Image: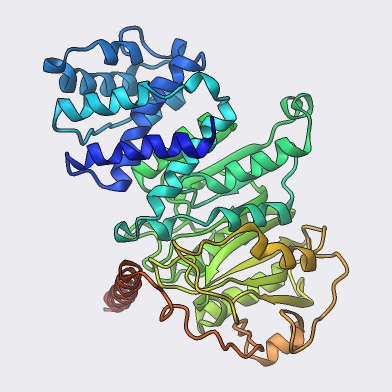
Amino acid sequence: MKNENVIQKIWNLCHILRGDGISYHQYVSELTYLLFLKIAEENDVERLLPIGFRWKNLVGEPNASLLGFYQEMLTHLGTSAESETIRAIYSFPTTVFSHAENLRAVIEGIAKIEWHDLTDDRIGRIYEGLIEKSSQDVRSGAGQYFTPRALVNSMVRIMKPKLGEIIQDPATGSGGFLISADHFIRSENSNSAYSKNPPKYEGAEIEKNTRRICLMNTFLNRLDAEIIYGDALTDDAAHFRSADLILANPPFGNKAGSKRALRKDIPYHNANKQLVFLQHIYLSIGDEGRAAVVLPDNVLFEDGVGKTVRQQLMDKCNLHTVLRLPRGIFSSAGVKTNVLFFNREKKEKESTSAIWFYDLRANMPAFGKTNPLRTEHFAEFENCFGDDPKGKYPRKDQGETGRFRCFTREEIADRGENLDITWLRDESGDGEDALASPEAIAAVILGHLRSALSEIEAVADELAETV
């Protein structure tokens, strides 16, 4: 049985849930509850569930009392399951079903799938597939929170996570970076070696239902992961350890930390959330630790605090590579993005001597639902990057007509610490104008409006603080 077939079978049940007015994102959250019960029955995890509150009990409940029992079951699992992770998955549950007939139809649809044909690893991949399908609903805006799998896997291949490392994502989302890192480590090592020295994963997720999905996802993929419910920019993450590797795509937008106080060890407070996340990341990697982080263009050129943060990054870390990403891969947010690759140096000054830029944006097609980003799009970049995750593999500047170029630290300083560097003539047109779907165009406009509103609110907050 192929993963895609199972994903589609489960996804087809969405038509039933629409009858109860359930959105795509709510659909995946609801599946977190139901799929776990069924998978627990198949995979010898059911012993961790309280007797009387298992899949067979749900299946056997009469329609007249099904909704009430289901709600009681979710509440009981959130308070009485032996496993702390399972209790967290079912903590403060809220079902969106309002008709027993629809709940019964979804239960029967899940029951018909031959789950015994699937290993734990494949089940985890299937669950990831459902999350990816949810992100493709441009109307929901979920796409801005989902990092394309091809990009995630490319960043992981480049950074080469290892056994025994502490690997962190301070904006975990559904857990894609952590799971991809774990798949990579397992593929590079024997089961015996992995069990003797497994990696440790840490993450933070501020949205309750997204964290619930992440817990389900990491549990099914057998990760030793601590995913806190909270904001990594506040004292919620004060107990995080120094990381050997950080992989992240911080959320777009401003108003970092909302009204809550930022951690005292973050030196430069600013309404730009990405600048605060960047500080968290380069201050959280240990000596000789490394990081790869997705950030929007404004982080490369913003003046004031932005310039100061870039200077500190280049002093404390070796910012050796910047990958300029194509347009449209986060179409619902309408932003242009990059990946910054850097590693922490033992010295506190002048750690960066040169930065290599790879332009994967100029003269590239518009990406989106009908033209997704694929592994092959990163092949040339990975070849240019080389086998050293710290960027020390021999490299060749391709000149003004190539995509890969090197700029010295002195050249960057002469540009006013502006890292928004382009040299190729882009004849592809604006990627936003090339979006084919009216829904995608509407989502881009909505993204711009949300971004503008966030900026207005941030300025208002700053003015209020000065009064």
Q: Quadrant of the N terminus?
A: top right
Whether residue 413 is visible to the viewer of this picture, yes or no, is yes
In the picture provided, is 126 more to the left or to the right than 348?
A: left
Residue 334, placed above or below residue 44 = below
Residue 430, placed above or below residue 53 = below
Q: How many marks?
A: 0
Residue 68: image location, x then y, percent: 16, 20
Residue drawn at 66 percent across, 89 percent down: 423
Residue drawn at 75 percent across, 72 percent down: 349
| The furthest residue to the left | 64
Residue drawn at 72 percent across, 39 percent down: 185
In the picture provided, is 398 more to the left or to the right than 80?
A: right
Residue drawn at 31 percent across, 75 percent down: 445
Residue 328: image location, x then y, percent: 47, 70
Colouring convention used in this rendered image of the protein: rainbow
Q: Quadrant of the C terminus?
A: bottom left
In the picture provided, is 432 more to the left or to the right than 96?
A: right
Residue 140: image location, x then y, percent: 30, 57
Q: Nearer the viewer, residue 285 or 428?
A: 428
Residue 416 found in image quarter: bottom right
Whether residue 227 is visible to the viewer of this picture, yes or no, is no
